[in-house]
Image (spheres, rainbow, N blue to C red):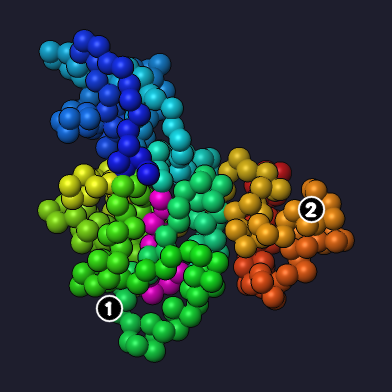
């Protein structure tokens, strides 16, 4: 069961409480205690940097509420800051909802980066094709055929139209008892999806620029929401056009490609990168049990990681 239903037991005394960060506005935080009460507060310097989803301890005084400690994280998701350095945007996530749409057009390379991050962080990835109302039957079938490369290796692909509320009933069971984060390019309808799943929530919605065919940035901080009956949580993240993979070694990239798992141990060399080494069992399966397209994506990601770590 994911963290949407389970919270670590913490021994609290006096005015101390355990809570979850539901938004970070910089100088101030919004947190929610385990009894459902929300507080605006600030953080002690020695508590460390905090992000949405963090579990913390609070000191509730007569005039102010202060975060005194951050509890250990079991997962975290990062994005690049203005200098290209990794910045954690959310923590304690069980599931990655990778939202794509026909407009702005998606690229499999970005999906694969999300999938590698999810696999290495032990998050369950789910691909959500939004804005299906923009497609006629032929175009929809074409996109679903493109995404079949993922369903064949066990990743759920759920077509929805958040604006028309089509397909949301298929998505809701996937969210139960989990802490999920909605990720994807700006403009794919992440906030519209949350508005559809959570009646009464007014997540900010942006449009797609006609000039660039890219989304306009609306969400500026990750926000955590409860699903109905507190049956899990969902985090709306800022739009991520570029998704880097930091602090992973070249030999870890293959661990993010689940279809390699049955063959990696059969390679002649233990440090095989499945590129040009002799006796590579992974490469032998390319075009058979491993998609040539996914293998090509692996090689490009491997090269990218090597350059980022250079």
Q: Which mark is residue 272?
A: 2
Q: Is residue 80 magenta-colored?
A: no
Residue 299, numbered circle = none
Q: Nearer the viewer, residue 277 or 310?
A: 277
| Left or right of residue 259: residue 131 | left
Element at label 1: helix
Image coordinates for residue 194, horizontal then vertical, percent: 25, 56
Q: Residue placed farthest to the front in the image?
A: 1
| Residue stretch rendered in magenta on the structure | 95-106
In the rendered image, residue 64, in percent from the top left (x then y), is placed at 18, 17
Read off the residue under disc 1.
133
State whether residue 217 appears in this view: no
Kindly give the residue lying farthest to the top in the view shown: 14
Question: Is residue 104 part of the magenta span, yes or no?
Answer: yes
Query: How many residues crowd mark 2 within 10 Å: few (<14), some (14–19), many (20+)?
Result: some
Q: Is residue 152 visible?
A: yes
In this picture, residue 297 sits left or right of residue 221: right
Residue at coordinates 78% horizontally, 57% vertically from top-left?
266
Residue placed at 56% from the left, 54% from the top?
116
Q: For residue 283, which quarter of the picture?
A: bottom right
Location of the N terminus (image quadrant)? top left
Q: CA distance from mark 1 to mark 2?
A: 45 Å
Residue 188's spot in the image, x, y percent?
34, 65
């Amino acid at each position: 069961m994911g963290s949407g239903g389970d919270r670590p037991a913490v021994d609290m005394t006096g005015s101390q409480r355990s809570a979850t960060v539901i938004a970070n506005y910089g100088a101030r935080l919004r947190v929610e205690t385990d009894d459902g009460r929300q507080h605006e507060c600030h953080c002690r310097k020695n508590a460390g940097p905090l992000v949405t989803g963090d579990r913390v301890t609070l000191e509730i005084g007569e005039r102010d509420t202060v975060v005194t400690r951050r509890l250990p994280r079991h997962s975290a998701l990062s994005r690049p800051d203005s200098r290209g350095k990794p910045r954690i945007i959310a923590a304690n996530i069980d599931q990655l909802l990778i939202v794509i749409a026909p407009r702005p057009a998606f690229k499999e390379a970005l999906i694969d980066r999300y999938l590698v991050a999810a696999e290495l962080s032990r998050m369950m990835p789910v691909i959500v094709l939004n804005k299906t109302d923009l497609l006629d039957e032929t175009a929809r079938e074409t996109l679903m055929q493109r995404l079949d490369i993922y369903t064949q290796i066990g990743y759920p692909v759920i077509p929805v139209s958040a604006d028309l509320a089509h397909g949301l009933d298929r998505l809701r069971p996937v969210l139960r008892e989990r802490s999920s984060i909605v990720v994807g390019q700006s403009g794919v309808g992440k906030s519209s999806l949350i508005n559809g799943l959570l009646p009464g929530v007014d997540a900010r919605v942006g449009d797609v620029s006609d000039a660039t065919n890219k989304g306009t940035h609306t969400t500026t901080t990750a926000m955590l929401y409860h699903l109905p009956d507190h049956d899990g949580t969902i985090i709306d993240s800022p739009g991520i056009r570029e998704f880097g993979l930091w602090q992973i070694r070249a030999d870890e990239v293959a661990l993010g490609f689940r279809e390699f798992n049955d063959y990696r141990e059969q390679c002649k060399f233990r440090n095989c990168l499945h590129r040009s080494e002799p006796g590579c069992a992974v490469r032998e399966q390319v075009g058979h049990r491993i998609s040539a397209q996914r293998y090509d994506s692996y090689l490009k990601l491997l090269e990218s990681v090597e350059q980022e770590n250079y």
